[in-house]
Amino acid sequence: MALLRSLAVAAPLLVASHAQAPTFAGGTPTGSSPFARPTDLNAIPVSANASGAGGPLLQSFVSYSIEFAFFPDYAGNASYPNLFSNNLLESISAFSGTKPYIRVGGNTQDYALYDASLSVATNGTYIPSISKDYPLILSIGPSFFESYSTWPNTKFIHGFNLAKNTTDDRVKLLDTVPLVCKALGGGKLLYWELGNEPDLYKTSAQGRVRPPTWTESDYVSEWIDVTGKIGVSMAKSCTNMTRSYAYQYIAPSFAGTNNSLKPLTTWKDNLNAANYIALFSSHNYIGGATQPGVTLQGTLMNHASTVASVSKQIDTANALAQAGMTIPYILGETNSLYNEGAPGLSNAFGAALWGVDFNLYCAATGIKRVHMHQGTNYRYASWQPVDTPTTTKGTKPPFYGNIAVAAALGDLTVDKVQVEHLPLPDNTEAAYAIYANNSLARVMVINMAEYNYSAATVDSRPDVTYNFTVPTSCAGVGVVQRLIANGSDAITGVTFNGRSYNYELDLGKPRLLGNVTKDDITWVGEDGIFAVKVPYSSAALVQLSC
Ligand SMILES: *[C@@H]1O[C@H](CO)[C@@H](O)[C@H](O)[C@H]1NC(C)=O
Ligand SMILES: *[C@@H]1O[C@H](CO)[C@@H](O)[C@H](O)[C@H]1NC(C)=O
Ligand SMILES: *[C@@H]1O[C@H](CO)[C@@H](O)[C@H](O)[C@H]1NC(C)=O
Ligand SMILES: *[C@@H]1O[C@H](CO)[C@@H](O)[C@H](O)[C@H]1NC(C)=O
Ligand SMILES: *[C@@H]1O[C@H](CO)[C@@H](O)[C@H](O)[C@H]1NC(C)=O
Ligand SMILES: *[C@@H]1O[C@H](CO)[C@@H](O)[C@H](O)[C@H]1NC(C)=O
Ligand SMILES: *[C@@H]1O[C@H](CO)[C@@H](O)[C@H](O)[C@H]1NC(C)=O
Ligand SMILES: *[C@@H]1O[C@H](CO)[C@@H](O)[C@H](O)[C@H]1NC(C)=O
Ligand SMILES: *[C@@H]1O[C@H](CO)[C@@H](O)[C@H](O)[C@H]1NC(C)=O
Ligand SMILES: *[C@@H]1O[C@H](CO)[C@@H](O)[C@H](O)[C@H]1NC(C)=O
Ligand SMILES: *[C@@H]1O[C@H](CO)[C@@H](O)[C@H](O)[C@H]1NC(C)=O
């Protein structure tokens, strides 16, 4: 450490003579010293402790939600497990300490009906006039539940159907209980869920399933009635899973914070009367895929738009807390643009940068876990699990954003991790401080100024040098790990810290590329100041030793 500090002190002029700076250990020293300091640093102050940060995050903060009908594509089955998906989940686990938690749900959770005679996992019928993206008529067979066995050390939330409520449909629902509780034995169960986005049941564009007179208290009565019936059935087939510590749900899984059922009214109407609810789950989208005026720069690579969107959740969480709710608030389903994302936006590298800003902003404001929603052929998916006529099997840019978030947070099973939002002047940039056990561990800087590399005529990618003041105990070496691609419009060639997770290289396992920098060095001066150069449309994670 003494050696590294003296090197830091010996580098006082490097900022001023950046172009001539010698390289050291594969990186360019851009650090500083207590003397010869330029005066235009605008250094961003970073606290020594987490007193300004959001509360500690839950394990597996980086989690996924997988559209019910496509879960067999993502996970495979007992004969053909999807190893590619598993490799990607393992790559997140290498940072987080646990694999992402998988919620199996979404719109098709509320269409799915059990058919004991179906010889395949799913039989879906599309009605293209309503949605080209997922089946509106869906049966699942016994082999659907095999998909819960393919990924080792993975915990799941299984979504039960609440929308379909004829007597016959309810019988089919209860018929799945023994199958799914056995499939999720042996520690695979995280929680249950009943119903997807019931706040849209009486207004949904995909078909209304409740009358206009249906209220929060009607929903609460149904939810309590059906969770009770599921519990009675489960007590027969999987007795120990209905002990109070084990029989737990996420709810209410509303699409928004101000739709036709309101979260606060629902809670006050005593949704948690039976004390089954472990986490308050809400859904969030920044905008719509076909909404007029939606752009990469204006909608996704835009910190103000992320702040405005997440603020609705935070206001709701605060109102619930004031009403006495004490359970953690999570996003059980979220992504960039609803209706499965827009091509050229949600699948572009710019959306990966959005994902980093969005997830860290959630972490900084008290949202304890975020499940990014996935589906086969969905434009915003982190990965495509199988080849289809429209989409090639592969790792997509948003996955690299998920990896960068996991790297920023570190091992949530060892450290108490908290995130603080560091305000920056422009909406095209964002920065966060990450604390482990109340001590500064990392800083993430995201530059979201659009650099459209297809449109660039010369190689002229601008960059911004960000300066930070961290505690003097951090003096010495900082290690810079970059999330980068050729530009915000890139749909391939993305790396995090010099590694690719692409399917075609090593089935989604990390592969170090020789042609991208990794672990650059920046010097943290004795006065705690460091600089990091961030190209437009890229992010830099600075690992500190404080
Ligand atoms: C960081 O400091 C350098 C001087 O070393 C300055 O040129 C640059 O503008 C500063 N960055 C910001 C974002 O102000
Ligand atoms: C946390 O750091 C701030 C300065 O950033 C300081 O004012 C405060 O006293 C510290 N709190 C604790 C508990 O150390
Ligand atoms: C298991 O997956 C394979 C490959 O996708 C598929 O051909 C087979 O039909 C599936 N088995 C069942 C029982 O669904
Ligand atoms: C699949 O569902 C359609 C109706 O949506 C039905 O006509 C067809 O027979 C079903 N296939 C199987 C194998 O059950
Ligand atoms: C299904 O929901 C409708 C609308 O809320 C209600 O009128 C009907 O009684 C419900 N059916 C059953 C079997 O619960
Ligand atoms: C219930 O018992 C089964 C079989 O012993 C075990 O695999 C499972 O983990 C237990 N579940 C709970 C929630 O205790
Ligand atoms: C909720 O929506 C209603 C219109 O349906 C609107 O009047 C109200 O201002 C909204 N509340 C919030 C907090 O956005
Ligand atoms: C945080 O605290 C835990 C439990 O005391 C410990 O195991 C871990 O090493 C600590 N992490 C750091 C970065 O100090
Ligand atoms: C990037 O530039 C290309 C070529 O000009 C254009 O077709 C594309 O729409 C641009 N992408 C975005 C996201 O603006
Ligand atoms: C990225 O840019 C480099 C250098 O111009 C080029 O060789 C490479 O093919 C580009 N990669 C992608 C995925 O466009
Ligand atoms: C780096 O190497 C990979 C794999 O060989 C290649 O696909 C990619 O285009 C290269 N990237 C750049 C920026 O040249």
Image: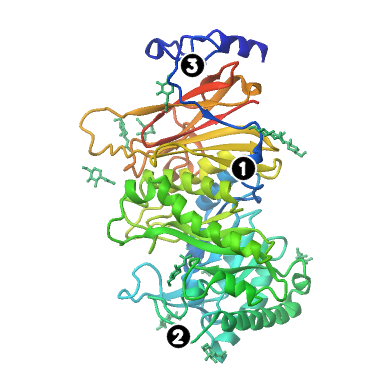
Q: Position of residue 189 (x, y in %)?
A: 67, 63
Mark 3 to mark 1 CA distance (whole Å): 29 Å
Disc number lying in front (3 or 1): 1
Mark earlier in primary sequence (2, 1): 1
Is 498 placed above or below 401 here? above
Is 124 placed above or below 530 here? below
Numbered circle sitting on residue 12: none
Numbered circle sitting on residue 53: 1
Q: Secondary structure at mark 2?
A: loop
Numbered circle sitting on residue 29: 3
Pointer 2 residue? 212
Check mark 2 vs ligand 5: CB closer than 8 Å? yes or no.
no
> What count of labels does the image hold?
3
Check mark 3 vs ligand 1: CB closer than 8 Å? yes or no.
no
* Residue at the image position 56 percent from the left and 43 percent from the top: 406
Q: Secondary structure at mark 1?
A: loop
Q: Position of residue 208 (x, y in %)?
A: 42, 82
Foreground residue among 182 and 365:
365
Disc number lying in front (2 or 3): 2
Mark earlier in primary sequence (2, 3): 3
